[in-house]
Image (cartoon, helix red, strand yellow):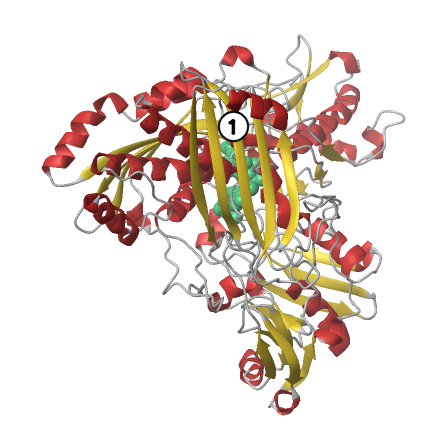
Amino acid sequence: MSDYRPMGQFGIGQPIKRFEDVRLVRGEGRFHDDVNLSGQAHAVIVRSIHAHARMLAIDAARARRAPGVLAVFTGSDVAHLGTMKMLLKRKRPDGSPMFAPPHRGLTRERARYVGDPVAMVVAETLAQAEDAAEWVRIDYEPLPSVTSTAEAVGGPPVWDECPDNVSNVHEVGDRAATEAAFARAARVVRRRYVITRVHAQYMEARGAVGAWDPGEQRYTLHADVQYPHRVRTALATNILNVPEHQIRVIAGDVGGGFGTKGWQYPEHRLVLWAARRLGRPVKWRCERREAIPADEHARDNVTDAELALDADGRFLALRVRTLANVGAYVSSDRNLLATFSNVATLVGVYTFPAAHVQVTSVLTNTNSTAPYRGAGRPEATYVIERLIDDAARELGVDAVDLRRTNLVPASAMPYKTATGVTYDCGDFPAQMEAALKLGDVAGFPARREAARRRGRLRGLGIANAIERAAGPQPEFAEIRFAPSGSATVFMGTKNQGQGHETTFKQILHERLGLDPGDVRYIDGDTDRVAFGMGSMGSRSTVIGGTALWTAADKVIAKGRKIAAKMLEAAEADITFANGAFSVVGTDRALPLQDVARAAFQPGSLPRGVEPGLYETGTFSPLSDTWPNGCHVCEVEIDPETGAVALVAYVVADDVGTVINPVTLKGQIHGGVAQGVGQALMEQIVYDPDSGQLLTASFMDYALPRADTLPEMVIESHPVPTKLNPLGAKGAGEAGTVGALPVVMNAVLDALAPLGVRHLDMPASAERVWNAIRDARRG
Ligand code: MCN
């Protein structure tokens, strides 16, 4: 940050309300369903009603004759299209290559989960397509299915080619050192944790509009995706086999993505292919009732975790064996992301001399799993933070003291973990002490006693969270000035509700002093933005923000030359601060926008300086950032009904430099809500015998409501990272990472006096009530 000076009103750290909200709350956003192209037809996907079935015949004759129907396509029509490719190289337990069958868009011969796309009906209107879809007759021969993670290995084969249902095995850490540590441990604590299958439940269900321009020989896809450029690459190189410039992907406003709206869904290729085939744009819109059957799901692990301790309560080693349910298809690396982003932070914020982790990805008759807020990191934190609480109870020690004994001290930074990653900075003990104070943990016994007098069981939970964010992948930004001096910013990241317009305008204001009103913000269009990796893994602020900072540095460098001529001074004597170039030691200054205007007037330019002012920045960090924090919450349980009320929630967090405390808090609030939802009520449930999806709508899939969450107190204690000039770490997933374990720890703490030793999520009233009853029965 060479010329860095904190800017006022709109700069970094200012609690600005989101600029984009004005148009969004007025209903002036432009989401995928707002896209209606001239002459468009409507598509409906016919999905398998069976978890596993042979498809003996498809009779679409009657559907094709139905009013308004333009076409009915089945798997054989799209069999020539390509599929996604895996880049990850993994092996099965016997050393053979991993078994990763991609989805082909429409399945042929076999349907492998309830919701598997089987046919597509295209008609003049949506109603006609829906009516005709009812007439597509599929002769199914149901087959035995398996949906449960724990029963996948040895269950009915999802694919005949993979009889044991094991897709691949992934190992991290030092097996021998871990075995040795367990052999000499004074105590070993073992637990099994089940992490449920959930759905992202964005406000806006997915959708896509495909168009083909015969004159330009180009496809255009309008879709709510998180990384339009990578979707374009995938469509061009894997699916449609055309040069990348023959595809344009446009993502307008996106009503939530949470990791699940990435990459390449079957419907993307289907609407593009059908649009070309029919010579008309084709629109598909996912109905809310279709979302759980149609979308990728998340989490769904069964983990056996073992903690080895010495006689003083110091952690010696961690051994983890996880079964990760990856569903019926493994189309791209993304479907395995949670199985490797999970392992690094299983050791949490603690010193572990040794660790060994083995993740076995198993195939089942369920939707593919994919990233969802945290993508493996909430699961990891859940395992270590619950295991510590369980260990404390088993050993009869205080859970906070056990954590204190084992926290990585700030003096140990950078710290290399036994799982092979390096935490560059952070002060974990300080975060925990701050959270304990913020949550008035000292006053908890009195609150517990008061609750007891009211007939309630009160519990306190603590969880230290850490996550890998903003890994080393490039991101792009461009600043283009117009001849009149206003600017447009083009970002390769994609806003899905995080407040990117505000965040990036703040960063730009900080560096260039530009008034946000003089800047237009654009993202999500592969024709307008040169390059982008998109938004996931809490990377946009860190990597996109630094790319923007880099582009701004180039604007200053060129502007300095122009200003030198305009101010009749030597370039070396020109400084830039607070949005203006000035001559050192004088009061002669020029605002950036005057210099930008001059850049378009060749007569104003020094010799050799190219006219115009448009600069790009591409940044790729050397390493991940490690946002961390401590969550403390309290619950009260009604022992008569088992109902859990979350009554207090505090977070002390470190996301490095905070760009905007308001949007950051929004991120933590939203992230916590999603973690609380999973801990207390959300769950995708399949019937174990038939493999039927039992929770396909909001009648069966419970979501947290406003009154589920108490007032949250969030305090930032930044330890800025040196990995980027902003000092920022990722923040978009941090809330969820801590919320999953802290809520369950609080529930178990409340139930412990009754003798309840174990409970898996979700801590619904029914489960809690049963646990209380079982404990009372002894
Ligand atoms: N921020 C900040 N200071 C920092 C870091 C972030 O003030 N040091 C604030 C900024 O306002 C920034 C926001 O937090 O815009 C999120 O920043 P970042 O951590 O860079 O995350 P991304 O923008 O890359 O978003 C991805 C992340 C992920 S991975 C999921 S999942 C998720 C999340 O963001 N999905 C979301 N938050 C979401 N929020 C909404 N509304 N919708 C989603 O789909």
Give the side of residue 527 with respect to residue 131, left or right.
right
Report the residue at 69% width, 78% height from top.
Answer: 73
Report the residue at 51% width, 53% height from top.
Answer: 149
Q: Position of residue 177 (x, y in %)?
A: 60, 22
As rendered, which of 534 and 529 lies closer to the eye? 534
Q: Mark 1: few, some, or many residues within 10 Å (few <14, many ≥20)? A: many
As rendered, which of 213 and 452 lies closer to the eye? 452
Instruction: Determine whether 716 is above or below 487 in the image.
Output: above
Q: Which residue occupies the extreme top position in the image?
A: 585
Could you tell me which secondary element the residue under label 1 belongs to? strand
Report the residue at 25% width, 44% height from top.
Answer: 645
Report the residue at 76% width, 69% height from top.
Answer: 212
Q: Which residue occupies the extreme right position in the image?
A: 608
Q: Position of residue 373 (x, y in %)?
A: 51, 44
Q: Which residue occupies the extreme front position in the image?
A: 183
Q: Circle 1 is placed at which residue position?
A: 318
Give the side of residue 708 with respect to residue 453, left or right.
right
Which amino acid type corresponds to the residue marked 1 in the rendered image? Leu
Q: Quadrant of residue 285?
A: bottom right
